[in-house]
Amino acid sequence: MKVKCEYCGAMIDDQLDHCPNCGAENKNIRRTTDHTPKTIEELQQWYADRKLPPYETTRFFIGQNYTGKKAFGIYREGDEVIVYKNKADGTRAIRYQGTDEAYGVNELYLKLKSEILNQKANQGKKKGKKVDGKTVGFGCLGVFLSFVGIFIFSFISIVLMAKPLLTIAAIALPIAVWVLLAKAFPNIRSKTTKKVATVAFMVYLLLAFIGLTIYAIKCTTPVYYHYNDQVYVYYDNDYYEYYDGDYSPIDVDTVPAEVLDNGADYEFNADDIEWDSSYSFKDSDYYIDNLEPDDYSSDDDYDWDSGSDWDSGGTDWGSDW
């Protein structure tokens, strides 16, 4: 993303330390927060502190130019740092090559953190935690499961118990369908009416299940917007603004009208060359501290259990990153 140099007014990359036009310091630099590793050595120490398996197991080679297949890594070459991924076919994709070591380290750092969480999830270690007596991470999944439970209860009420009052207590719409059918066809025997109502409810249940599944996926997928050199994200019915390396919630009234009315024109494309992983909402400090389902609020939550097996077989080794 481009920002304006406060001294000469030139538009420069927000990841540069200094303006290439006048040499002034870029005070709007977008980078990691202070507690994250900024050098290869700091990342190596972070890795060691988490008691992660050897590089050969995790396939993350920090400070090494590993040439074998299936590997992520970072190393120095002269004044530059190179962040790479060796794919399954042996070809290498360069994620970053340049003199901004902190930026390169952050690229691999975010990828490593993501892989740790994936490994924990694959081993069934991700369980709901409690904070101040409340279960966290309910969110969209909780809404989804609650509705599914209501639908199942309604289905049992209609088909097995045939007690409309219990069904009305659970959910109104299926009963409304049942009543409308009964009024529309008063001469049909009750058994037939119940069958018709059951079929109608099953169709409704299927459509509701599909709709809620789409909703659950949509509300847990961040949507990014780039407008007037500012990044916004829409997530789970709320808007957030990117500033100084992190996101913060904002009221919908402060979101530019153009973004609200013509959002599709300003969306980021994650596959586009303009996409920068430093804008990743789910890797931001705000998300990790406040919205992460398993409340991964500190680096300690990335510690590795020495008794667990790390399996990189499920990693997408065909993509560039």
Image: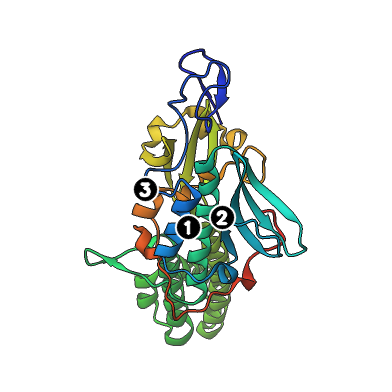
Q: Which residue is pictured at 56% across the width and 24% down the height?
A: 12
The amino acid marked with disc number 3 is His
Image height of 286 relative to 153, above or below: above
Q: Which residue is pictured at 41% across the width and 35% down the height?
A: 244
The answer to which of 119 and 155 lies nearer the viewer is 119
Q: From the image, which quarter does the N terminus lie in?
A: top right
Task: Specify the quadrant of the image occupied by residue 134.
Answer: bottom left
Q: From the image, which quarter does the C terminus lie in?
A: bottom right
For residue 40, say whether it is visible. Answer: yes
Which element type, helix, strand or loop, lies under badge 1? helix
Q: In this figure, which residue is indicated by the disc labeled 3? A: 35
- In percent of width and height, residue 258 lies at 52, 28
Q: In this figure, which residue is indicated by the disc labeled 1? A: 44
The amino acid marked with disc number 1 is Gln
The span from disc 2 to disc 3 (Cα, nearest Å) is 20 Å
Which element type, helix, strand or loop, lies under badge 3? loop
